[in-house]
């Protein structure tokens, strides 16, 4: 599952999308499973994913995660659709 996260930091807003690499980094750091996210996402987890996804998308962020946190004003999940949705079934109308 990929998340699109809207990040507001230093009065600038941008969207980033996580990917498998970001999710695995989160799993390694927090010793958790991606399936644990189904029960809720902590703000720290969301911030970590936004931090790593920002780096992967070429957004300039501080070297230290805590410095990134200090600059964040708001985080919001704007989309959590699967990366590869199942195609629609063929029906008589198609």
Image (cartoon, grey):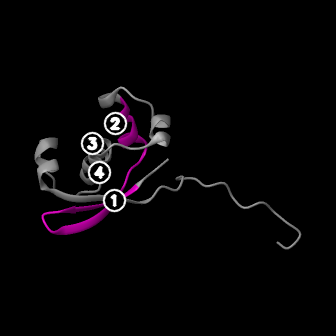
- In the image, residue 69 above or below residue 91: above
Q: Which residues are magenta?
A: 4-27
Reading the image, the residue beneath label 3 is 44
Kindly state the secondary structure of the residue where label 1 is placed. Answer: strand
Report crowding for label 3: few under 14, some 14 to 19, many 20 or more residues within 10 A (C-alpha): few
Report crowding for label 2: few under 14, some 14 to 19, many 20 or more residues within 10 A (C-alpha): some
For the view shown, which residue lies furthest in the right direction?
92
Determine which of the numbered discs, if any, sits on residue 26 in the image: 2
Reading the image, the residue beneath label 4 is 50
Identified at 50% across, 42% down, the residue is 38
Q: Please identify, in this view, whether the residue under mark 1 or under mark 4 is nearer the observer.
A: 1
Reading the image, the residue beneath label 1 is 76
Q: Residue 7, how many percent across, how many down?
A: 26, 60
User: Is 63 on the left-hand or right-hand side of 22?
Assistant: left
Kindly state the secondary structure of the residue where label 4 is placed. Answer: helix
- In the image, residue 71 above or below residue 10: above
User: Gap in Å between the C-alphas at discs 1 and 3?
Assistant: 12 Å
Q: Which numbered disc flags the more N-terminal residue, 3 or 4?
A: 3
User: Gap in Å between the C-alphas at discs 2 and 4?
Assistant: 11 Å
- In the image, residue 88 above or below residue 94: above
Q: Please identify, in this view, whether the residue under mark 2 or under mark 3 is nearer the observer.
A: 3
């Amino acid at each position: 599952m990929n998340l699109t996260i809207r990040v507001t930091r230093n009065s600038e807003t941008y969207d980033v999308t996580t990917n498998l690499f970001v999710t695995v980094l989160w799993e390694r750091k927090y010793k958790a499973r991606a399936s644990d996210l189904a029960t809720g996402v902590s703000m720290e987890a969301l911030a970590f994913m936004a931090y790593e996804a920002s780096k992967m998308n070429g957004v300039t962020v501080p070297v230290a995660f805590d410095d990134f946190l200090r600059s964040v004003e708001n985080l919001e999940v704007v989309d959590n659709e699967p990366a590869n949705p199942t195609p629609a079934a063929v029906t008589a109308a198609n």
